[in-house]
Image: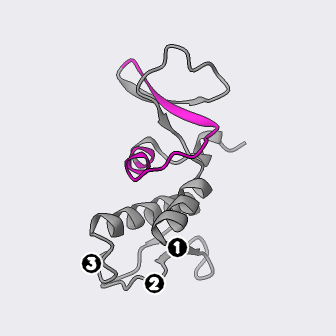
Amino acid sequence: MENIQNEFVPFEESYVLKQLGFNKPCCAIYFLEDGEFVLKSIWSSRNGLSDLIDAPLWQQAFDFLRENYQLNVVIDGSGSENLYTVFCRDYIYHGNRPEVYSYPEARLVALRRMFKILLDGGNKKAELG
């Protein structure tokens, strides 16, 4: 059985989403425990937990970026077996489009590409290579 943690955006990317204004209800959170951020179900008690970061599902993250920043992503797995290509629609790529060998890796590449576009000021001709 696949690890349920794989359904959630990793901590570092969840933190960036929070900085971008993400504040949708989530079914899990990251909280600081012994100097490290740990994923915990929100149905567990929040009492005594500080430094909380919401842990969105992948679809919540992509929906938030589409709805708030008009960024869309396509992860294409139609080419070679086990090869995925990431496209951010409406943005011009200079250099190669990223190709990765697993869907989970492709999701992470896509999210990071979207962050890079935003950090580059939304420039549609941003260097993404």
User: 75 and 61: which one is in front?
Assistant: 61
Q: Which residue is mark 3?
A: 127
**Structural crowding at the residue carrying mark 1, measured as other residues with C-alpha within 10 Å and reported as few (<14), some (14–19) or many (≥20):** some
Residue nearest the observer in this picture, 52 or 73 = 52
The amino acid on which the numbered mark 1 sits, given as a three-letter code, is Asn
The image quadrant of residue 50 is top left
Answer whether residue 32 is magenta in the image.
yes
User: Which marked residue is nearer to the observer: mark 2 or mark 3?
Assistant: 2
Q: Is residue 44 above or below residue 67?
A: above
In the rendered view, does 74 fall on the left or right side of 13? right
Measure how far apart labels 3 and 1 are at the Cα level. Answer: 17 Å
Dot 2: what SS?
loop
Q: Which residues are magenta?
A: 13-34
Question: Mark 2 vs mark 3: which is more N-terminal?
Answer: 2
What amino acid is labelled 3 in the image?
Answer: Glu
Residue 72: image tag: 1
Relative vertical location of residue 84 with respect to residue 106 in this rendering, above or below? below
The residue depicted at 33 percent of the width and 73 percent of the height is: 122
Density class for disc 3 (Cα within 10 Å; few <14, some 14-19, many ≥20) is few
**Residue ID for mark 2:** 90
